[in-house]
Amino acid sequence: MKFLPLLFANLLRRKLRTALTMGSFAVALFLLGLLLAVRGAFNQGVEVAQADRLIITNKTSLIQPLPFATRHKVARTPGIRAVTFANWFGGVYKDPKNFFAQFAIDVESWQPIYTEFVVPEDQWQAFLADRQGAIAGKATADRYGWKVGDRIPILGAGYPGDWEFNLRGIYTGRRPNDDLTQFWFQWKYLNEQAPEYARDYIGWMVVRLEKGASPVEVARAVDDVFANSAFETRTQSESAFMQGFVTQFGNIQLLMLAIGAVVFFTLLLVTGNTMAMSVRERTGELAVLKTVGFGDGFVLGLVLVETLVVAAIGGGLGLFAATFLSRMGDPTGGLLPGFHIPGAGLAAGFGLALVVGLVAGLVPAWSAGRLKVVEALRRV
């Protein structure tokens, strides 16, 4: 602690240079935080997927429906505890740009499957009692300023026409990265109002397994039931199903890794050059420190600590700014609903900033530690 005045005096010797170096760390860590949030949003479905849930779709394509009767056959499959189903609606709210996921759900079986979504009991009961009732995620409700009791008009796409719903509830999530952008309404209402050719069909089924049941064996058993029929099924784990959507966007992971690597390599060069300049300017002072009895290790450590302080303050500011932005909500208007920086990502980013600072300061610190007093004073 007694050397802190010396440490800060060195850092404040060139205030602008120190501020710019800290700013470089802040910008780099801010960008890293945004990349982590984007990566988390793309992988949101994969990360929150439950190991005991399977998704059953038409083998031909996800957009091809399944007859409602298939639900009963699936429910009789050994190893399955509960079954629910939903249809994709695909409408828009007032304007084509106001898009969010809308599902017609089976209200009797939805909650036991999706236990991570929380709806107040009174709101859920009001939803059950109203055939035109709907429940929206908190993110979507906040986005459009909806309140419980509002009348919500939706222009149908897959199911043409003007549809209206009564907002009976708003759901939240138990985890920070749960999807709070969905809009649910009753499948029975959809089935009653849909065109004749679209009635008694469901989009996909979600099943929860019995404790100890093998997901692979249950998936195979379900698909065997419908093999060689007019409606063959494809059953897969929820994580595999969600991963299929992520891969449609290409190798996002590689792209973000490449961007991050370039940014931090540049930061390493900038910081290393800054610290090397600082050591050169203080050659005489470092020589005096050694003359009065401070060893090579002290001088080396002093330079390294200076670099780490710059990295810690700059990196901390950048991560704070990125976290603040992520907590303001999804900046993409619904494209990336799970815009959230996990705590582990923040810790990893801060650690990476310290590592960059350490590596960038090693060569200047090693040079300062090996400094010969006579040569340094002669240079002055």
Image: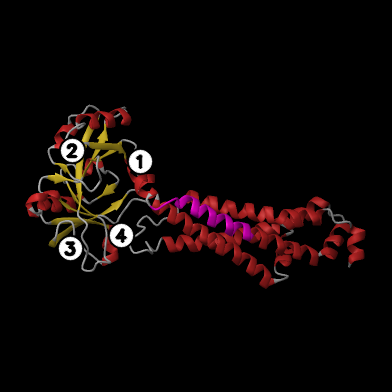
Q: Considering depth in this image, is 317 or 55 the residue closer to the camera?
A: 55
Q: Principal SS element in the magenta part? A: helix
Q: Specify the segment rendered in magenta.
A: 249-267
Q: Is residue 310 left or right of residue 151?
A: right
Indicate the amino acid at tag 3. Answer: Ile
Q: Is residue 310 left or right of residue 64?
A: right
- Give neighbour class at mark 2: few <14, some 14-19, many 20+ (Cα, 10 Å): some
Residue at image coords 34%, 60%: 335
Q: Is residue 250 magenta?
A: yes
Mark 3: secondary structure: strand
Label 3 or label 2, whichever comes before in sequence order: 3
Picture disc at residue 154: 3
Mark 4: secondary structure: helix
Instruction: From the image, tell me which residue sits under label 2.
Output: 231
Label 3 or label 1, whichever comes before in sequence order: 3
Give the image quarter of residue 240. top left
Residue at image coords 68%, 70%: 17
- Structural distance between the alpha carbons of marks 2 and 4: 36 Å
Label 3 close to label 4 by CB (< 8 Å): no
- The residue mark sitting in front, 4 or 1, is 1
Picture disc at residue 240: 1
Q: Considering depth in this image, is 2 or 254 the residue closer to the camera?
A: 254
Question: In the rendering, at what x and y percent does residue 128 appear?
Answer: 13, 50
